[in-house]
Structure formats: C-alpha cells, structure tokens
C-alpha cells in the first residue's frame, strides 16, 4: 500500500531526501489512510450527524470541508514530525507534503459529498 500512495503523493510533492525517508518509514500508507478517512468522516458528519435545516447551505458545507482539510493537514504534519524529526532535519518539507494532502482531502470531501448527500434528509441538495 505504501507503493500505491507514494506514487500519488510523489507526483504532487517530491523532494528526493525527504520522499526517500517517508517511503523508508512506510509513512505514505499511514498518511494515505488518514487522507481517506478524515474527509470521509467530515462528509458523514455533515450529511448524517449535523443534518439540520439551518445547516443545509453551501457555506456550512464548505466550512466543514475546510475544517476537514485543516485537520488532515495537522494530522499529516504530526505524523511526519513524530516519525522523522528524531532521525532527520527537514524543515519546510513537512509542511509541503501536509499542504498537498490537505488539498487532496478537500477534493475527496467533495467526492464523498456526492455519495453521502443521498442519505441526507435536509442537505440532499447541497452543494449541487
């Protein structure tokens, strides 16, 4: 699974020494799973748990997606720093990969919205 996620993330962000270290520590698979689960959880949270008429608007939907992307960014950053900071001295690379995973999380949130809006009562027409 590390190979699969590495091929995706290294297309978006590749720094030779950093990417090698992330691959060696099998962090691409951990980051990839986190990057799939967090937007899924936020989409489920919006469409099923917080499914209220006063929250059924595009602004609230977008805020949930952005918060999910920020949570994803923080989780990825934390995973990278905790695993690599004792062995390596990377500076901006941690944030570089984390930023790209946040964008992926936002795109996945939009895609999951198409799936979850079918089970929603009040937000079934949000965002489209």
Image (cartoon, rainbow, N blue to C red):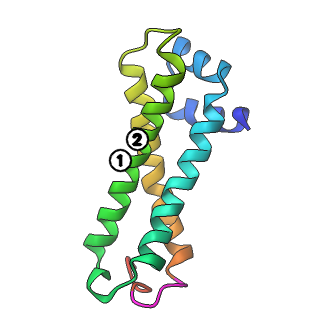
Chief SS of the magenta region: loop
Count of labels in the image: 2
Residue drawn at x 42%, y 21% as measured from the top left: 93
- Residue 96 is labelled as none
* Residue 41 image offset from top left, x and y in percent: 51, 62
Q: Nearer the viewer, residue 15 or 71?
A: 71
Quarter of the figure with residue 10: top right
Q: Is the C-beta separation of discs 1 and 2 under 8 Å?
A: yes
- Residue 70 is labelled as 1
Q: Is residue 15 magenta-colored?
A: no
The Cα–Cα distance between marks 1 and 2, rounded to whole angstroms, is: 5 Å
- Looking at the rendering, the stretch of residues picked out in magenta corresponds to 118-122
Q: Quadrant of the N terminus?
A: top right
**Residue marked by disc 2:** 73
Label 2, secondary structure: give it: helix
Residue drawn at x 36%, y 20% as measured from the top left: 92
* Residue 52 image offset from top left, x and y in percent: 34, 85
Q: Nearer the viewer, residue 74 or 126?
A: 74
Tell me: residue 115, above or below residue 4: below
Q: Residues within 10 Å of mark 2 (few under 14, many from 20)?
A: many
Q: Is residue 70 left or right of residue 101?
A: left
Quarter of the figure with residue 53: bottom left
Residue drawn at x 50%, y 11% as measured from the top left: 86
């Amino acid at each position: 699974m590390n190979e699969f996620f590495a091929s995706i993330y290294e297309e978006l962000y590749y720094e030779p020494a950093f990417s090698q270290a992330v691959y060696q520590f099998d962090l691409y698979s951990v980051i990839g799973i986190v990057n799939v689960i967090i937007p899924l959880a936020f989409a489920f949270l919006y469409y099923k748990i917080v499914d209220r008429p006063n929250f059924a608007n595009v602004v609230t939907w977008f805020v949930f997606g952005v918060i999910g992307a920020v949570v994803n960014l923080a989780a990825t950053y934390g995973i990278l720093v905790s695993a690599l900071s004792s062995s390596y001295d990377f500076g901006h690379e941690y944030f570089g990969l984390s930023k790209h995973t946040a964008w992926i999380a936002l795109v996945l949130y939009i895609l999951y919205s198409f799936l979850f809006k079918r089970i929603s009562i009040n937000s079934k027409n949000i965002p489209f």
